[in-house]
Amino acid sequence: MKSEILYGIHPVYEALMAARRDFLEIYIEKKKASKRRDQIVSMAESKNLPIKKIDSIQFKTMVGGNAHQGIAARVSKYPWQEISDILDQAKLTAGNTFLLLLDNIIDPHNLGALIRTASCVGIDGAVVPKDRSVSPTPTVSKASAGALEHIRLARVNNMVRTVKMLKDLGLWIIGTDQNAQQSVYSNDLTGPIAIVIGGEEKGIRPLVRRNCDILISIPQVGPINSLNASVAGAVVMYEAFRQRQSQKKK
């Protein structure tokens, strides 16, 4: 079984809670303790998982830095979902599908931040292309504060084909583009939708952009004329969340 090292309190804790990965071993730093770490150790012991104490030098070598917070775990690789399963699950719950399409996101910290926000607003699932996208690595899990361990993430060979398939199923495809004439605040983001967030430098790729139903921008003032991908994604996702929550109250 292929494995990787998750590190940090939130990723290890959330992976244990989500129970979607196989745990092979838990590592704790000998001289470092905290209530959260002790809670994880208790959870691991209740599951009869092997726990190994190692020193700080071994920790740094294993995870490639100091961001481990004294705990790590060797686990199975991230469990990708099929997009068909994500859509089926969406039908079983609210039936008001809310997806996130991440086109050309290559920075792991941006991917982690986007997934963290997506989890907070109740996204049914996120989709990334097989190429031109960062993988859901332990760095992404750390950047997402462990949200990666809960979210349904699918990888597709062709994002344009996926967009067309979603449109055929009745979803509106909402693309983000800083040059778009329509504001995020003047569009209806309720109903079955998929929000497309583009990469850090070039945004949404041209073919994907052309297949979006609507392109929206985020109003801005000041000398800086663009937001980073994770911030832009958070603004749009929360506006959609606000509208959808308001609709539920009616």
Image: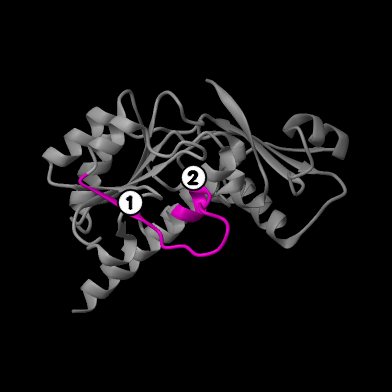
Is residue 220 within the magenta segment?
yes
> Callout 2 environment at 10 Å: few (<14), some (14 to 19), or many (20+)?
many
The coloring applied to the image is one colour
Is residue 189 within the magenta segment?
no
In the image, which disc is placed on residue 180? 1
Q: Nearer the viewer, residue 47 or 189?
A: 189
Q: Quadrant where the C terminus lies?
A: bottom left
- Mark 1: which secondary structure? loop
How many numbered badges does the structure rendering display? 2
Residue placed under numbered mark 2 in the picture: 149
Give the amino acid at mark 1. Answer: Ala
Look at 49% across and 47% down and name the residue there.
229
- Whether residue 147 is visible here, answered yes or no, is no
Q: Gap between marks 2 and 1, in whole Å?
A: 34 Å
In the image, which disc is placed on residue 164? none
Outermost top residue: 1
Q: Position of residue 14 (x, y in %)?
A: 54, 50
- Whether residue 113 is visible here, answered yes or no, is yes
Q: Nearer the viewer, residue 7 or 161?
A: 161
Q: Position of residue 38 (x, y in %)?
A: 71, 56
Q: Along the polypeptide, which appears first: circle 2 or circle 1?
A: 2
Look at 25% across and 36% down and name the residue there.
210
**What secondary structure is the magenta-colored segment mainly?**
loop
Q: Could you tell whether 4 is left or right of 174 in the image? A: right
- Mark 2: which secondary structure? helix
Q: Position of residue 205 (x, y in %)?
A: 37, 32
Q: Considering only vertical position in the picture, is 139 above or below 207?
A: below
Give the amino acid at mark 2. Answer: Glu
Q: Which residues are magenta?
A: 213-232
Query: Where is residue 26, by image quadrant?
Result: top right
Q: Nearer the viewer, residue 225 or 22?
A: 225
